[in-house]
């Protein structure tokens, strides 16, 4: 389903897909950039129950993020 005027930033046209549609993909790519994404990425990658945590692919799932968005890792030493 196409959305010509989004209700959230960035206010650009977008496409909304259901979880079954996403699960049928052979590859899924998440792209995140900037420090404002760091906290949400930490939450997603720690397994918190968020939409991005529930997204699955029929094949490969790839996360791309810049250094600013990458969650800080706790030392395990």
Image: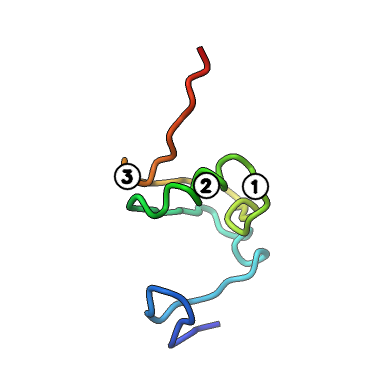
- In 3D space, how far apart are the residues under numbered discs 2 and 1 (Cα atoms)? 17 Å
- In 3D space, how far apart are the residues under numbered discs 1 and 3 (Cα atoms)? 21 Å
The image position of residue 40, as x and y in percent, is 50, 51
Residue under label 3: 68
Q: Is residue 25 left or right of residue 20?
A: left
Which badge, 2 or 1, comes first in the chain's sequence?
A: 1
- In 3D space, how far apart are the residues under numbered discs 2 and 3 (Cα atoms)? 21 Å
Asked if the residues shown at circle 2 and circle 3 are in contact, with their CB atoms under 8 angstroms apart, the answer is no
| Crowding near the residue tagged with mark 2, few <14, some 14–19, many ≥20 C-alpha atoms within 10 Å | some
Mark 2, mark 1: which one is toward the viewer? 1
Residue at image coords 53%, 45%: 60
Which badge, 2 or 3, comes first in the chain's sequence?
A: 2
Which badge, 1 or 3, comes first in the chain's sequence?
A: 1
Q: Residue furthest bottom?
A: 4
The image position of residue 24, as x and y in percent, is 62, 60
Which residue is more in the foreground, 26 or 69? 69
Residue under label 1: 48
Which residue is more in the foreground, 31 or 48? 48
Mark 2, mark 3: which one is toward the viewer? 3
Q: Is residue 32 left or right of residue 49?
A: left
The image position of residue 73, as x and y in percent, is 46, 30
Colour convention of the picture: rainbow
Q: Is residue 15 left or right of residue 12?
A: right
Q: Residue furthest top?
A: 77
Residue at image coords 55%, 82%: 1
Q: Secondary structure at mark 3?
A: loop
Asked if the residues shown at circle 2 and circle 1 are in contact, with their CB atoms under 8 angstroms apart, the answer is no
Q: Secondary structure at mark 2?
A: strand
The image position of residue 47, as x and y in percent, is 64, 43
Kindly identify which numbered label has been placed on residue 61: 2
């Amino acid at each position: 389903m196409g959305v010509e005027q989004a209700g959230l930033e960035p206010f650009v046209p977008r496409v909304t897909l259901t979880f079954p549609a996403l699960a049928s993909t052979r590859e899924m790519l998440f792209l995140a950039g900037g420090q404002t994404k760091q906290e949400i990425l930490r939450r997603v990658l720690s397994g918190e129950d968020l939409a991005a945590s529930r997204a699955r692919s029929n094949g490969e799932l790839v996360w791309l993020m810049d250094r600013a968005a990458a969650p800080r890792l706790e030392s395990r030493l």
